[in-house]
Image (cartoon, grey):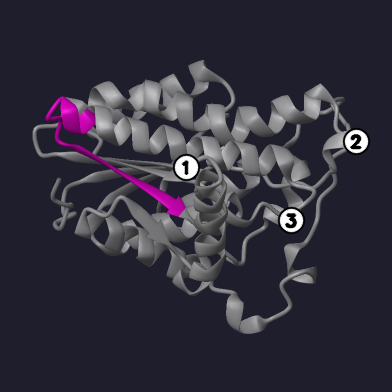
Amino acid sequence: MEGITNWTGRVAVVTGGASGIGKGIAGAFRGEGATVVIADRDATALAQVQQEGYATVETDVTAADSVAALAERVVGDHGRVDVVVNNAGVGPKGAAADLTLEDWRWVLDVNLMGVVHGIQAFLPHLTANPHGAWIVNTASMSRFFTPPGYAPYVASKAAVEGLSLTLAAELAADDAQVGVTVLHPGAVRTNIKASLRNRPAGSAGGLVDFDIAQKIVDDDMWIGPEEAGAIVVRAVRNGDRYAFTHPGMRSDVRSAFDAVLEGMDKYT
């Protein structure tokens, strides 16, 4: 479907929006004229963005009732919702052999079920919007090059992509005026290196925070959250199914799909 080009009077909701990519996306939509509601579980970060003029709602995306309350609050306060960005995510590191089931559940609850809860809570409001609406789900470039030590993270982000594409196909089949974009960020400067700060107390396992900047030392690879936000707005404006922050990483994508095709060729 056609993208959304005029944001005046429209309402955007961004989960995990008080910092990092989420805040960059929030700023980009506000810059286009939208009213932006930032949802996050970090009360300190929420207080900061509230001082910057954003509407805020403290939200735990792992809890369906919390996200449902967010949706009702947004529609109650603003009368509509035009775009939902399911962006909240965590990315700690840990070898699969060292992880507990609680490790897996936590990462999947945030990264995957957080998206599911966002869709469940907001989709009825989006499909009822007579002006058309949009969903943006944050996946990851790691889905293509699968770095060791990130099995729960990569699994969750691959699932987010599959969920997004399936949802897009269903909405198109129903002729619903709701578009879907899946965002694949690469090296963006965020505080994902401190993911464990938001893990519930008493559930420690084999996960540790890791600063990916130790691995990606090329400064030219990194972009700021504001640049990522501008990419998302452009994707929604153009009606794009995919949004990539680092199109220069196409060799990783090509290698991933070449391996799939090579595997298929063995059975032809």
Q: Kindly tell me whether residue 83 is visible in this rendering.
A: yes
Instruction: Write down the residue under mark 1.
Output: 268
Q: Kindly tell me whether residue 126 is visible in this rendering.
A: no
Neighbours of disc 2 within 10 Å: few (<14), some (14-19), many (20+): few
Instruction: Write down the residue under mark 3.
Output: 193
- Examine the structure image and report whether residue 201 is included in the region drawn in magenta: no
| Residue depth check, mark 2 versus mark 3: number of the one nearer the observer | 2
Q: Amino acid at mark 2?
A: Asp
Neighbours of disc 1 within 10 Å: few (<14), some (14-19), many (20+): few
Residue 203 vs residue 48: left or right?
right
Name of the residue lying farthest toward the left:
130
Q: Amino acid at mark 3?
A: Lys
Which residues lie in the magenta part? 171-183
Of residues 50 and 133, the one drawn nearer to the viewer in this rendering: 133
The quadrant of the rendering that contains the N terminus is top left
x and y, in percent, of residue 58 in the image: 53, 33
Tell me the SS state at disc 1: loop
| Residue depth check, mark 3 versus mark 1: number of the one nearer the observer | 1
Quadrant hosting residue 112: top right
x and y, in percent, of residue 180 in the image: 30, 42
Neighbours of disc 3 within 10 Å: few (<14), some (14-19), many (20+): some
Seen at 36% across and 66% down, the residue is 230
Which numbered disc flags the more N-terminal residue, 2 or 3?
2
Instruction: Write down the residue under mark 2.
Output: 98
x and y, in percent, of residue 174 in the image: 15, 25
Of residues 147 and 30, the one drawn nearer to the viewer in this rendering: 147
Seen at 26% across and 21% down, the residue is 124
Tell me the SS state at disc 2: helix
- Rounded to the nearest whole Å, what is the CA distance between mark 1 and mark 2? 38 Å
Quadrant hosting residue 133: top left
Q: Amino acid at mark 1?
A: Thr
